[in-house]
Amino acid sequence: MEFHLVDYIGYAASILVALSLTMKHIIKLRVINFIGCTLFTIYGVMIDSWPVALTNGFIACVNVVYLTAMYREFRKNGRSKFDE
């Protein structure tokens, strides 16, 4: 069985997205999920699968929006409502 770079990217993306769902802390979940979705976006482009690329690109953007909001709230209040 021969592996190529695209295979490694796909497996890494799958592992990171699955791992992110085991996180208790929402910031860790979003950061790991963002990395996994970004890898899945790259994977989707590499295998010419636009549904995979677009869906995961959108999810990565959603993660960035929420992480930015959490960061702004932390800077404003010294803590985030997501700290629990």
Image (cartoon, grey):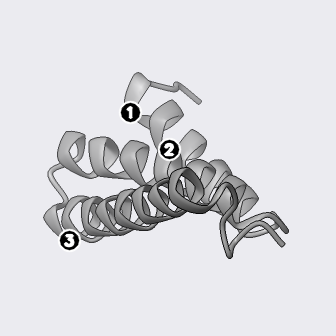
Which residue in the structure is indicated by mark 3? 51
Is residue 84 placed above or below 61 in the rendered structure?
below
Residue 35 disc label: 2
The quarter in which the N terminus is drawn is top right
Q: Position of residue 32 (x, y in %)?
A: 62, 49
How far apart are labels 1 and 3 at the CA level?
17 Å
Q: Position of residue 47 (x, y in %)?
A: 23, 46
> Going 42% across and 23% down the picture, which residue do you hit?
5
How far apart are labels 1 and 2 at the CA level?
16 Å
Q: Is residue 22 left or right of residue 76?
A: right
Q: Is residue 20 left or right of residue 66?
A: right
Q: Is residue 38 left or right of residue 23?
A: left
Q: Secondary structure at mark 1?
A: helix
Residue 6 disc label: 1
Is residue 68 placed above or below 2 in the rendered structure?
below
Badge 2 amino acid: Ile
In which image quadrant can residue 42 be found? top left
Q: Position of residue 34 (x, y in %)?
A: 48, 52
How crowded is the residue under tag 1: few (<14 C-alpha within 10 Å), some, or many (20+)?
some
Nearer the N terminus, badge 3 or badge 2? Answer: 2
The residue lying toward the viewer, choosing from 6 and 57, is: 57
Q: Are marks 1 and 3 in contact (CB under 8 Å)?
A: no
> Going 23% across and 58% down the picture, which residue do you hit?
53
> Going 84% across and 73% down the picture, which residue do you hit?
84
Badge 1 amino acid: Val
The residue lying toward the viewer, choosing from 45 and 24, is: 24
Nearer the N terminus, badge 1 or badge 3? Answer: 1
How crowded is the residue under tag 2: few (<14 C-alpha within 10 Å), some, or many (20+)?
some
Q: Are marks 1 and 2 in contact (CB under 8 Å)?
A: no
Badge 3 amino acid: Pro
Q: Secondary structure at mark 3?
A: helix
